[in-house]
Amino acid sequence: MSSENYMVQLKNVNKWYGNFHVLKNVNLNVKKGERIVICGPSGSGKSTTIRCINRLEEHHQGEIIVNGITLNNDLKNIESIRRDVGMVFQHFNLFPHLTVLENCCLAPIWVKKVPRREAEATAMRYLEKVKIPDQAKKFPGQLSGGQQQRVAIARALCMNPDVMLFDEPTSALDPEMVKEVLDTMISLAETGMTMLCVTHEMGFAKSVADRVIFMDGGQIVEENEPNEFFNNPQNERTQLFLSQIL
Ligand code: ADP
Ligand code: MG
């Protein structure tokens, strides 16, 4: 397949934290519109992998190409990649001193120079999509965890990204709020968005993922379409991991 059809490519990516070799020859091609779930034990390098894609972490060897742009030290490249990539974190990372609406408008106004009125209209549209338009004037601290995470998703979508990265978006939530966030992610998947999701929500993986990637020790150890991955894992480490979480 020609590289134009890929949204994200990682080619032999290596990274170290000091002496610690955290990513070891990671290779990953994500097609446009593809939904990938990344799972694996704590410390296996899942967050580091996706954080390298928008340069929240720097890789040291290998190549990362996002939407046709090669990620290097050129700030222009980093900025254009960040414009194409939306990210949702485990701990929401909303600005606590800004209202929900202001959180959603900040980057469109300051980074994309969208006129305020237009940014607000777009923000309200996405807040409706995540089913909390009535919370627009509140501050993050006044919302439940599930609502805050839906704001974080709406905020990322306001930048009109081409790919969305999720880093354990439901693992800080009380159990009763997990479903509302997963439902939001499922409806996003239905729009055809390219998604890379680090999650251990295996129901989500089964219903949404085109491919499940299993990482251990800084390497991609196994990958497969969800049915095969869950029913017929090949690698011993995958089998052990699945026996612990399923
Ligand atoms: P995961 O998301 O799979 O739990 P991470 O990518 O967060 O794994 O971390 C992989 C490994 O790198 C862990 O051993 C972690 O302790 C280590 N690590 C993560 N971030 C840093 C950092 N900023 N400095 C040093 N070590 C780190
Ligand atoms: Mg992590």
Image (spheres, rainbow, N blue to C red):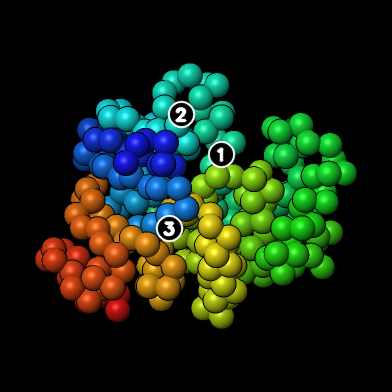
Which residue in the structure is indicated by mark 1?
A: 84
Residue at point 57%, 72% (across, down): 183
Query: Could you classify mark 2 by the number of other residues whose Cα lies within 10 Å: few (under 14), some (14-19), or many (20 or more)?
Result: some
Residue at point 53%, 21% (across, down): 75
Ranked by sequence position, the earlier of labels 3 and 2 is 3
Side (left or right) of 208 relative to 41: right
Q: What's the mark number on residue 35?
A: 3
Classify the position of the C terminus by image quarter.
Answer: bottom left
Q: Quadrant of residue 62?
A: top left
Which residue in the structure is indicated by mark 2?
A: 69
Residue 163 visible in the picture: yes
Classify the position of the N terminus by image quarter.
Answer: top left
Disc 2 within 8 angstroms of ligand 1 (CB): no
In the depicted structure, whether residue 147 falls above or below residue 110: below
Residue 95 visible in the picture: no
Q: Residue 199, position in %: x, y? A: 41, 63
Q: Residue 47, position in %: x, y? A: 39, 49
Question: Label 2 is placed on what type of residue?
Answer: Ile
Distance of label 3 from label 1 (alpha carbons): 16 Å
Distance of label 3 from label 2 (alpha carbons): 20 Å
In the depicted structure, whether residue 173 falls above or below residue 223: below
Asked whether disc 2 touches disc 1, contact meaning CB atoms under 8 Å apart, the reply is yes
Q: Residue 22, position in %: x, y? A: 26, 41
Residue farthest right in this picture? 117
Ranked by sequence position, the earlier of labels 2 and 1 is 2
Q: Quadrant of residue 223?
A: bottom left
In the depicted structure, whether residue 62 falls above or below residue 6: above
Side (left or right) of 208 relative to 235: right
In the depicted structure, whether residue 215 falls above or below residue 109: below
Side (left or right) of 206 relative to 89: left
Q: Residue 140, position in %: x, y? A: 72, 59
